[in-house]
Amino acid sequence: MLVDRLKVSDVLVRCEAFVKLAKLPEDVLVQHSAVLGDGMRDPDAAVRCKAYGAAAKLPTRTLVQNSASISAGMRDSEAIVRQKACAVVGKLPAEILVEYSAGLGACMKDASALVRCEACAKVSKLPEGKLLEHTAVLSACMRDSDVFVRRKAFEALNTLSSDSLAQFLLPIRECMGDADALVRQRACAAVARLPIDILIECSGMLRKCMNDSDASVRQHACDAFILVPEDKPVAKAPWSPRFPLA
């Protein structure tokens, strides 16, 4: 039987069994939640990884019963397991996700870009008040060395109100000069959502972005710049590695 294969000594057999378990209908999978909990604590990282993949298919009420294993997965010694655990956490509704807020914050500072990327994607589901508790680390992710982490950080910013978004003005302005076009585009889109008095401070950089080599960046810059009142002076663009001052 499939359940028996989950307990054999051969790692490959256990991995294969968890992959097959994940394909079972939800009502059948729920009956094996205890075995999934054991799999998430398996001594082999490959098995733990497959177990988290299967656990992601469980309904919320059953996932909550395995909260200890999920939290442990976010602190696992293997990056791929930490990433899978963050992915499972992201399946939870916001009112339960808040319980994992500290764990997600820690994963946003993880040594692995894969984990940081997954954590940034999932922290965006937190209520605004909880998300703002991670202002410093989210700002750091906007400056991350990995472009995919920087992109995911902006997904979290998209959930914030205009006034809360203003707390990220400095990293947003820096990202308007990012080496990656998609990051520049998202930075320009974020500027358009800032309070008008703060948006004006970015008008100089917006003018630079309106001449960007990427059409989408130019479009988003124009969309933001048009919001600047005509009677307001345009700020001079600050220095940027991409747009050095003449």
Image: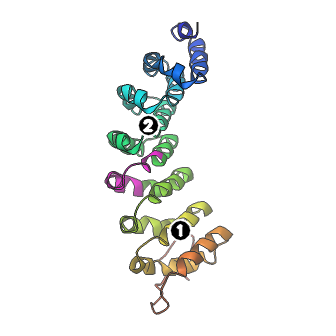
Residue on which the image places disc 1: 189
The relative height of residue 44 versus residue 160 in the rendered view (above or below) is above
Q: Which residue is mark 2?
A: 89
Q: At numbered mark 2, what does the secondary structure look like: helix, strand or loop? A: helix
- Which is more toward the observer, 88 or 215? 88
The residue under the point 37% across, 25% down is 65
Q: In which quarter of the view is residue 70 placed? A: top left
Give the amino acid at mark 1.
Ala
Q: Which class describes the residues within 10 Å of circle 1: few (<14), some (14-19), or many (20+)?
A: many
The rendered magenta stretch, by its main secondary structure, is classed as helix
**Which quarter shows the N terminus?**
top right
Q: Which residue is found at the position 32% from the left and 39% from the top?
A: 99
Q: Is residue 85 above or below residue 125?
A: above
* Residue 64 appears left or right of 204: left
Magenta segment, which residues?
A: 122-139
Q: Secondary structure at mark 1?
A: helix
The residue located at (56%, 81%) in the rendering is 207
| Of residues 129 and 32, the one drawn nearer to the viewer in this rendering | 32
Q: Is 111 within the magenta?
A: no
Label 2 neighbour load within 10 Å: few <14, some 14-19, many 20+: many
Could one spot residue 76 in this view of the protein?
no
Q: How is the image coloured?
A: rainbow
Query: Camera-side residue: 106 or 228?
Result: 228
x and y percentages locating residue 39 in the rendered image: 47, 18
User: What amino acid does circle 2 point to?
Assistant: Val
Residue 115 in picture, x, y percent from top left: 48, 40
94 horizontally vs 218: left or right: left
